[in-house]
Image (cartoon, grey):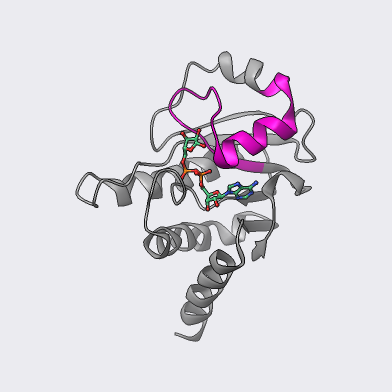
Amino acid sequence: MIEIVKTDITTLDVDAIVNAANNSLLGGGGVDGAIHQAAGPGLLEACLLLGGCDTGDAKITPGFNLPSRHVIHTVGPIWQGGQHDEPALLESAYLRSFEVALENGIDSIAFPAISTGVYGYPKRQAAEIALTVMQEFENDFKRIVVACFSQSDAELYKAIADKRASN
Ligand code: APR
């Protein structure tokens, strides 16, 4: 079951929320900043032990003060025009997040729109990639939540999902 909702991902009571981090895993702005703010200092301490994260990879920590038990930190590509493996790297960020979730017995997971903020990835193209990978894993999880920060993002995802459902 894939749910598309407009929400602040830090409020979701799921097994894991996915963080759109950077390679250092030392926090930042956007959803990364919100997650660290809500989780508290323990999250940064746990991230310091991970030794960073490659673009397209994913690593897991506890959720600390968040309602979600875990945080899966992934790093999406910075958009550079589309000729630098961005689509493959974005797909890998979603794929590796799902793989790490399955390795840790996670049954409900929420994603932000990875790379579409500071990293500048075009929203529609990113949503197409995200939904394709989510549909591949749909039967492996009780809940997959697309946590859109804006109403327009949620409507974009819903339009794409509806178009696929009608095909
Ligand atoms: N809940 C859900 N989604 C959120 C939240 C939130 N609390 N805050 C922001 N977002 C959304 C943004 O609106 C955007 O749609 O998350 C999406 C990803 O945007 P960014 O957070 O800017 O992440 P990204 O584009 O992947 O850039 C990553 O930004 O914050 C830094 O440290 C981070 O360097 C890394 C870079």
Residue 22 in the figure: left or right of residue 34: left
Q: Is residue 40 magenta?
A: yes
Give x and y (percent) for residue 105: 68, 39
Residue 63 vs residue 139, the one in the foreground? 63
Quarter of the figure with the N terminus: bottom right
Give x and y (percent) for residue 167: 44, 85
Give x and y (percent) for residue 86: 30, 47
Q: Residue drawn at (54%, 18%), measured in percent from left and top?
A: 50
Residue 75 vs residue 81, the one in the foreground? 81
Q: Quadrant of residue 154?
A: bottom right
* Magenta stretch, residue numbers: 17-43
Q: Is residue 133 magenta?
A: no
Residue 82 in the figure: left or right of residue 49: left
Residue furthest to the bottom: 166
Q: Quadrant of residue 41?
A: top right
Q: Residue drawn at (47%, 57%), measured in percent from left and top?
A: 130
Question: Number of numbered discs present?
Answer: 0
Q: Is residue 63 visible?
A: no
Give x and y (percent) for residue 56: 40, 38
Q: Residue drawn at (32%, 47%), measured in percent from left and top?
A: 79
Residue 1 in the figure: left or right of residue 133: right
Q: Residue drawn at (61%, 56%), measured in percent from left and top?
A: 149
**Where is 110 relative to 28, above or below?**
below
Q: Is residue 67 visible?
A: yes
